Amino acid sequence: MDYQSYVIELIDEGIIAIDSMAHIKIYNRIARDIFGLNPDEGPGHPEGKIAQGDIVIIADNLLGADDGGLEPEDLRAIGIEPSGIERGDAVVAIGTVGGRTGSGVFNRLDKKIPGESLSVETSIDGLKLKAQIDFDLKRLRATVDGRHYDYIFRWAAGHMVIVDRASRDVKFYQTRGYTARQEELKAVLCGKPFRGKGKFGQVFQILERHINEIHPDSHIIRSLIAVARGESCAVRGLESMINGIPVRCSIEPLVVDGNNAGAFLKVLDITELKAVQIERERVLSSLENLENRIRKERIQKEAFKDVVRSGEKIRRVVEMAKRAAETSSTVLLTGESGTGKGLFAEAIHRAGCRREGPFVYVNCASIPENLLESELFGHEKGAFTGAVAEKPGKFELADGGTIFLDEIAELPLTLQAKLLHVIQKRTFTRVGGVKPIQVDIRIIAASNRDLEDAVRKGIFREDLFYRINVISIKLPPLREHREDLYPLVSHILPRVAERVGKKAVQISGEVMKIFLDYDWPGNVRELENVLERAAIMADGDIIMTGHLPEYILGQNKEDNIGGMVTVKKIGPLKELLTETEINAVKKALEICGGNRKKAMEMLGVGKTNFYKKLKKARSS
């Protein structure tokens, strides 16, 4: 080695020099290290090529990216059915060359889904085989009978191990530098010969070869060739990728005796730096996602703070409403009067991306029909008698926010057609106007009527029903989630008491029992009204039965013990008394939900006497 070559080998940057014909003249040790062209590592294998019947193990963290352009369909060569596999997926697969489609095994991870690891394992002819990707360690691993063949990747890589089925020897494994050696996964899988490695390794001739034989066409290699030919396009400190490896490059012309003689490329491996940058970006992205999730949860919690949801039914409804809030889709709220449709509509608005915009409430049943169109869409000056000035409608006022159309079933058919157009086009004209008005709104509709029945009767347009029924949320009546009664009372009572200037903040146990027995046809709205009336009637801080309206006490009286005794036929008094006691015990247990202690208290009998009567009731 001459003095000049010795110095070049000592330089701590990769140096690649080509002549004007793009043939390699210098390729120093650091360059060979960067691109994996030094003596091959591992136990070694002779040169050869893949053959029919060979067992193949593949671990590819980004299908098609740095594996020679491997396509899902190429996996059929080892018996893999590629349906469902896409370019960009992480794939681990084990199969036999020439095996029937479906005989191989694989696992995949969608490119959009982050993961920690991916693996698949099987046995063929007694050989225990496994393919694994560890995304945290950035390691591709193929295992043959407990022996690991690893490939550490930085970005994307396709790792493959081939086992000769007859000899059971590993005849090929992948190592760094496969792109320069032209041993990409797809090339070897398709039958291109591979070089020997380890003790079978041959000296890899680099000098005097065309640069594209070692480094496939890329922007930086094209620039190197252009400078070597005398063009003025030098590069300084450019970050690029060569053979899938991130490097910082500089290109300078080679001038000998004033004449252009070629060009040289200086490369610095920045793999570690890039890995740190990518990890930093990943952490920042995860942190941002976490902050967004916390922010969203905080907003949703605040938006739905007035919705009491201790029971499973209401919790499911709230979760559905939260999902609806994340979109701008039209929502239809259904349920009996008083179930809280207005409360849910406002909560969905406050939890959504339009929360900074207006929330406009419209009760379609409370506006006279002759004024309804003007109220919804506005009118121009002089549009009708009394229209002394132009007036924006509710839809204009809701621009940028949400419009809540309560009792939408009460809209006349003529206005239903115009509403359908607004939902489809988000445009309308005022009454007496000709200029279309564009609005950006979210529509929430509500009805306590069965809209499908209304469609069948011809009083509600079918096309409008399907337009508003994008996300349908049915609110259950209070009688179907009585477990929420106590939390609702605890939430509502202090507020109504403060509103009416009273101090009643709790209810007695007997009042709670009456509430649990009542059907609440008016739902939560009725509960609030009853509590307000009771708070007004109460003198202290506890609401007693005497503070409740007569109609609630009236229903409860029908269920009291005196009302349960029925005499089916006249007979001996002793038998009649026994029958009455049995009926009383059964009814008391029914009212108390099977709670024997409460039933005893209700009947006013001792434990021994109660259980004696309970035994008679059971035997009857």
Image (cartoon, rainbow, N blue to C red):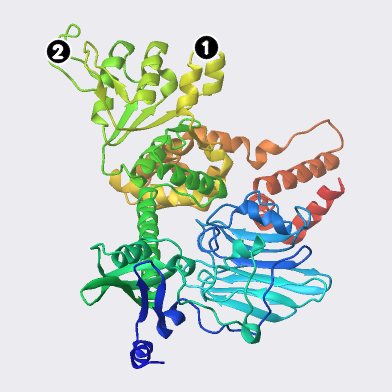
Q: Where the N terminus falls, by quadrant?
A: bottom left
* Residue 215 x %, y %: 45, 67
Q: Which of marks 2 and 1 is nearer the N terminus?
A: 2
* Residue 99 x %, y %: 78, 57
Corner quadrant of residue 360: top left
* Residue to which mark 1 is pinned: 458
The residue that appears at 45% across and 80% down in the rendered structure is 32
Residue 14 versus residue 344: which sits nearer the camera?
14
Query: In the image, what residue type sits under mark 2?
Result: Lys
Give me the C-alpha separation between circle 2 and circle 1: 35 Å
* Residue 600 x %, y %: 68, 55
* Residue 289 x %, y %: 39, 60
The residue that appears at 53% across and 70% down in the rendered structure is 135
Secondary structure, mark 2, is loop
Query: In the image, what residue type sits under mark 1?
Result: Gly
Residue 429 versus residue 218: which sits nearer the camera?
218
445 over 488 or under it: above or below: above
Secondary structure, mark 1, is loop
